[in-house]
Amino acid sequence: PGPSRLHSPRPYWTEEPPWGVGKGTWGRPRQIIVDDDDSKIWSLYDAGPRNIRCPLIFLPPVSGTADVFFRQILALTGWGYRVIALQYPVYWDHLEFCDGFRKLLDHLQLDKVHLFGASLGGFLAQKFAEYTHKSPRVHSLILCNSFSDTSIFNQTWTANSFWLMPSFMLKKIVLGNFSSGPVDPMMADAIDFMVDRLESLGQSELASRLTLNCQNSYVEPHKIRDIPVTIMDVFDQSALSTEAKEEMYKLYPNARRAHLKTGGNFPYLCRSAEVNLYVQIHLLQFHGTKYAAIDPSMVSAEELEVQKGGLSISQEEQ
């Protein structure tokens, strides 16, 4: 389906682009503690119709905070979707993260969700789907610039020492993966915004995320093979190697592929229109079911038929 068949978002902001989001534009994110340790605080923005019981949840990369997905929240809630963007507490291993995330979904009274994960967020989304495979909590996955095996970073031997490193060293490691060559103005703004978000993270937050990103672990695909997946990646330079991308394609041979010509590490910021379109196309397959992430009143019966017809045609073409 082309853009003409999709809703147009209501304008929420007067200035464009609002790179200052997160500094008071929205107010403070909601903070939730679900573990016995009171220092483990989840921060989140929960936007859109609360009657939706299977929302789309966004999981950020190592350098990201909940508000890096503000362009998705603005557009998708304008179209009637319920969207939740998260920021992780400090967790030091994948099992601990998965257990905490499950408790968060229980607290929010969400039985099943769609997950959009960027880079580390995509890996954690896959690990959570794997962790809950006997009692599924993940209805679908959108994996943006993500990976399935942490060994691709060649840092597994240092993963257990990140907690000892000072902030400036951790930030230097993360910044080493940011684009350094000439980029267009929107990509430059996206990088500046992510650098600003990186600066807002404390030593333990960064150290724990890098540990999750690099400690030896891989996804077991047989545990999540029945989950609908869209793999979203870019053709220009990003932190993800060609080998890592190919491995993802092999792991999910039936996944839909959403390719962006450009976008670097942060396409959800600098190519948000394309990303939001691909997100809508992914979620279309659930319209009219109890796992729809959109308010049914925002989708007419005629439009639903047109969208489903267009989707089946595009699948045949693929």
Image (cartoon, rainbow, N blue to C red):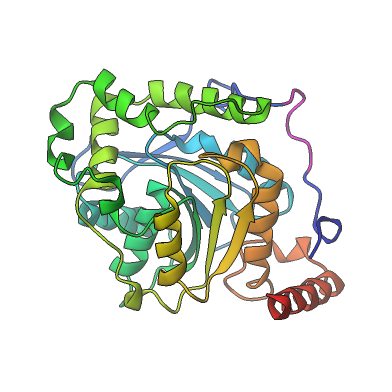
| Left or right of 100 in this view: 160 | left
Report the magenta stretch's main SS. loop
Q: How many marks?
A: 0
The part of the chain drawn in magenta is 10-16
- 176 or 2: nearer the eye? 176
Task: Check the image and report above or below for 191 versus 118.
Answer: above
Image location (x, y in percent) of residue 110? 45, 62
Q: Is residue 110 visible?
A: no
Residue 127 in which image quadrant? bottom left
Task: Check the image and report above or below for 180 versus 89.
Answer: above
Image location (x, y in percent) of residue 61? 42, 41
Image location (x, y in percent) of residue 106? 36, 59
| Left or right of 64 in this view: 277 | right
Residue 224 forms part of the magenta stretch: no
Image location (x, y in percent) of residue 187? 61, 31
Q: Quadrant of the C terminus?
A: bottom right
Q: Residue at x 62, y 64 (%)?
A: 282
Q: Is residue 142 visible?
A: yes
Task: Check the image and report above or below for 11 versus 317.
Answer: above
| Left or right of 160 in this view: 59 | right
Q: Quadrant of the N terminus?
A: bottom right
